Image: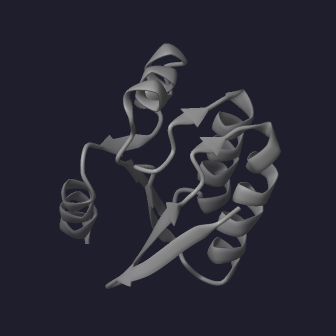
Amino acid sequence: MQMESEQQGDILVVIPMEPRLDAAQATDFKSAIVDRINDGHTRILLDLSHVDFMDSSGLGAMVSILKTIGRDGDLLLCGLGNTVESLFKLTRMNRVFRIFSTREEALQAISAQG
C-alpha cells in the first residue's frame, strides 16, 4: 500500500494514498503502521483524506493498530470522508477512536496533551 509520512515534532503523520482500505489492502496497511510503532513512533496521526472506502477488514486493521499502540501511545484520525465517517458511526468506532475533521485540529489536540 502506498503511503506518505511526515514528522511533526514527536508526532508521525501517515497518509495512506490508496482510495480503498479493504481486504486487499488491510494487511499491508496494518503491517506498515505496526512497523512504524515498532520503530518507536508511539504518537501517530492517520490522515485518511485520500481514503474513499473502508470495509470491515480496513476497520479491523485500524482496531489492531490501536491495540498495538496501547495506552502509552496516541492514535488519532483525521480527514474522514462521508463514507468512511459513516462506517465509524455505524459501528460506533467513533467512540473508540479520536477523530478530527482536519489535520490541524488533530495536531493541536495531541500537542495540548503533552
Give percent across and percent down for residue 58.
68, 39
The answer to whether residue 56 is above or below residue 63 is: above
Residue at figure coordinates x 64%, y 35% from the top left: 59
Q: Is residue 113 left or right of residue 56?
A: left
Give percent across and percent down for residue 113.
25, 64
Q: Is residue 63 left or right of residue 94?
A: right
Residue at figure coordinates x 63%, y 72% from the top left: 37
The answer to whether residue 98 is above or below residue 74 is: above
Give percent across and percent down for residue 13.
42, 70
Can you tell which quarter of the image residue 43 is in?
bottom left
Can you tell which quarter of the image residue 30 is in?
bottom right
Q: Is residue 17 left or right of residue 34?
A: left
| Residue, far top | 90
Give whichever of 74, 45 is nearer the camera: 45
Give whichever of 82, 87 is nearer the camera: 82
Residue at figure coordinates x 39%, y 40% from the top left: 80
Residue at figure coordinates x 35%, y 47% from the top left: 79
| Residue, far front | 19
Which quadrant: the C terminus? bottom left
Give percent across and percent down for residue 4.
52, 73
Give whichever of 111, 50 is nearer the camera: 50
Q: How many marks?
A: 0
The structure's colour scheme is one colour
Which quadrant: the N terminus? bottom right
Give whichever of 57, 35 is nearer the camera: 57
